[in-house]
Amino acid sequence: MGYVSAVSVPQPRAASAPDSAGSRRSLGAGLLLGAAGATVVLLASGQTWAEGKAAVGGGVLPLSADGQDVTGLPAALAVVGLAALVAVFAVRRSSRLIVAGLLALSGLGAGISAFAGASDRSALDEQAAQTTGNTSATVQALSHTAWPYVTAAGGLLILLAGLLALRYGSRWPAMSGRYERDGTPRPRRAARTAPDPDRPEELWKALDRGEDPTREA
């Protein structure tokens, strides 16, 4: 009598699930960096970037220029970056890559323009000319604050958010499908049958629903 030995057959391993933890971390980091960077840029752009003095009638008049006076580009690009950060979750596939690229470019542009404005004097020279009434007047005792560099740092945060979106955005969730129309017909409600007159409980249920139990279906 022969014996058949049981041979263990290796079972195929289940497909590894996507790295949901890593996706959540990159998603959280992207949102935090993008929102924080845009906030920093918008707030720092409203601070004083440069200070100086203009000679007026034998005296001097203090002058100051904020980020918006020097260049409005960082703040404008921060707004674009915020819009792109939100739009990343509204699009899919290649469109998401395009929006993520726009987010990164917004941060890069905000940072470069803010860094370039750190040594700008044209805004105060223009104020000096207007104050003195002399078109050739220039600002004196010019000094700059650290706010342009803070603005540039905010642009860098937006850039990092865009790079994260480019690298991991394909794993991030999109807006819920229940807000989208996929053309799938919705199931119809089953037609209610007329209550059985021999079952009083069905008559009472029909009355509770506001139906006429005497009406034929």
Image: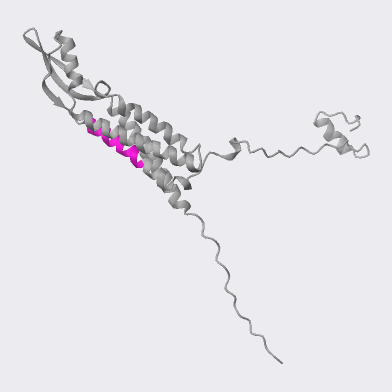
Q: Position of residue 49 (x, y in %)?
A: 21, 25
- Residue at 58% over, 40% down: 177
Q: Position of residue 78 (x, y in %)?
A: 35, 30
Determine the image quadrant of residue 13: bottom right
Q: Position of residue 32 (x, y in %)?
A: 38, 39
- Residue at 40% over, 32% down: 82
**Nearer to us in this view, 128 or 190:** 128
Q: Is residue 19 above or below residue 146?
A: below
Image quadrant where one finds the C terminus: top right
**Residue extent of the magenta highlight:** 148-160
Horizontally, residue 200 falls left or right of residue 188, namely: right
**Nearer to us in this view, 180 or 36:** 180
Instruction: Point out the residue furthest to the right here.
Output: 198
Determine the image quadrant of residue 195: top right
Q: Position of residue 179 (x, y in %)?
A: 59, 35
Image quadrant where one finds the N terminus: bottom right
User: Disc count in the image?
Assistant: 0
Magenta part, dominant SS: helix
Instruction: Point out the residue furthest to the bottom here.
Output: 1
- Residue at 80% over, 31% down: 209
Q: Is residue 168 above or below residue 77?
A: below
Q: Is residue 151 magenta?
A: yes
Horizontally, residue 25 falls left or right of residue 120, namely: right
Horizontally, residue 192 falls left or right of residue 119, namely: right
Horizontally, residue 123 falls left or right of residue 57, namely: right
- Display colour scheme: one colour
Determine the image quadrant of residue 35: top left
